[in-house]
Image (cartoon, coloured by chain):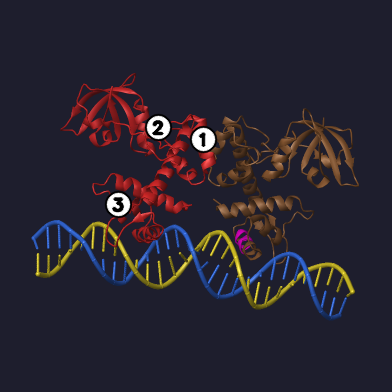
Chain colours: A brown, B red, C blue, D yellow
Amino acid sequence: MASEAIENYLKAIYSLSRESPTGEAGMKSIATMTGVTVGTASTMVKRMAAAKLVKYERFGGVRLTAKGDRAAIDVQRRHRLIETFLVQTLKLDWSIVHAEAERLEHAVSSAVLEALAIHLHHPCVDPHGDPIPDADGKTHVGRGAALATFAPGSRVRVARIADQRPAFLSFVAEHGLRPGAKAVVAATGSAAQSITVQATGCAAVTMAIAAAESIICETA
Amino acid sequence: MASEAIENYLKAIYSLSRESPTGEAGMKSIATMTGVTVGTASTMVKRMAAAKLVKYERFGGVRLTAKGDRAAIDVQRRHRLIETFLVQTLKLDWSIVHAEAERLEHAVSSAVLEALAIHLHHPCVDPHGDPIPDADGKTHVGRGAALATFAPGSRVRVARIADQRPAFLSFVAEHGLRPGAKAVVAATGSAAQSITVQATGCAAVTMAIAAAESIICETA
DNA sequence: CCACAAAGTTTGACGGTTCAAACTTACAAG
DNA sequence: CTTGTAAGTTTGAACCGTCAAACTTTGTGG
């Protein structure tokens, strides 16, 4: 249906508008996220508007239509199921599957996708703890807050890592902070903008508050 | 490396030149096989020649270079491993996996491909019995002759089905003639251009000699 | 309220892949 | 040896996705 390029714009607009207070995405950020110049993003968004995937007006923000939203969620389902498959079935490393899934997500038909879902027993989160929308596009929302918000002494369970960069994922895994792991917040140094945390069975690690923003936890 | 389009031309030229006495492919057949006009094929072959993937001169036949040959075999390996995966791991139907693999073969990286090979225990034939080249591009050749060439009374083992059309594959499967199955040639009607064969545990079936050309067997 | 920076738009161009249609070559049959 | 046909080539145009660069709008600090 939508071309590979369009699917990438959909993903970008989806995630940008999700974390914007206005619920709209700007051209600059769309361009940055898709790795393209602002002019290109502008051109493509206009094309997407013609295809009724987004709504926007000149110099105003970009917002997905219901159709665009559904399409974006579809891509997300494909992406996350593929990541799960790559880690679980093919035993590929957690830290690299994001890039691989990025290429494959545009090539899986829905027949293959559903067979994949069956093979994996309909998982509801991917290896990073991100929720996988079901075939109807509904997502089972997980609660949780950034590790940065917990007070010293808190016992937490890691739910999700909200940063796909391989180096960060390797760092996190190395210190035992994968989704599902239990940990204790040892100390928070507000002066040093840092937080120290110890996962069960691992050495304590100190990281910047900014990094801890990407580690989503629940009270254990 | 090579674009998706180019990979498709490579596959076409590879298989056409393989079954041509001269070892060369014609523009018309390349165009037909890739589903494109002759003019387009001509244009693209010229481009491939510039990229040293094929050798050809105006109004002469097209032949793969060593580099093109290697690239074509690579695509074939990807295609066949994916087909095997779709049938074996995802339990998709034998008769439809060809089309699915056609879309996926351009999106699997070599990391994913090798992980797939390991997961499948390095199979050497795909679900149709076609040999899967190894990572170095070497193919373990299987002997065998068309079912059409066996005399009445011959006991055979089906080795390979050399026709990917879903209807044909369904027909073959329905009569128990999947790769690996044992069968007996009951009769050959040279006047009716037909052959009757019975797979172990199935009813006998009569088909045209032309159809039996696509069923490759070995003496059992 | 003005000027300037940041964001957004437009335009012209390019590479890749495709088509239709006009044209050329090769070759076999008479 | 001519000629008709099948095969092949070329050309001009289109669409997609992209860029660079010129331009316009918005909104904010002084």
Residue assigned mark 2: B125
Whether residue B142 is visible, yes or no, is yes
Q: How many marks?
A: 3
Quarter of the view holding residue B36? bottom left
Say whether disc 1 or disc 2 marks the residue closer to the N-terminus. Answer: 1
Residue contact at pointers 1 and 2, CB within 8 angstroms: no
Q: Considering depth in this image, is A138 or D27 the residue closer to the camera?
A: D27
Say whether disc 3 or disc 2 marks the residue closer to the N-terminus. Answer: 3
Q: Residue furthest top?
A: B201
A3 vs C7: above or below: above
How far is mark 1 from mark 2, CA to CA? 14 Å
How far is mark 3 from mark 2, CA to CA? 26 Å
How far is mark 3 from mark 1, CA to CA? 32 Å
Give percent across and percent down for residue A109: 52, 42
Q: Which mark identifies residue B116?
A: 1
The three-letter code of the residue at mark 1 reads: Leu
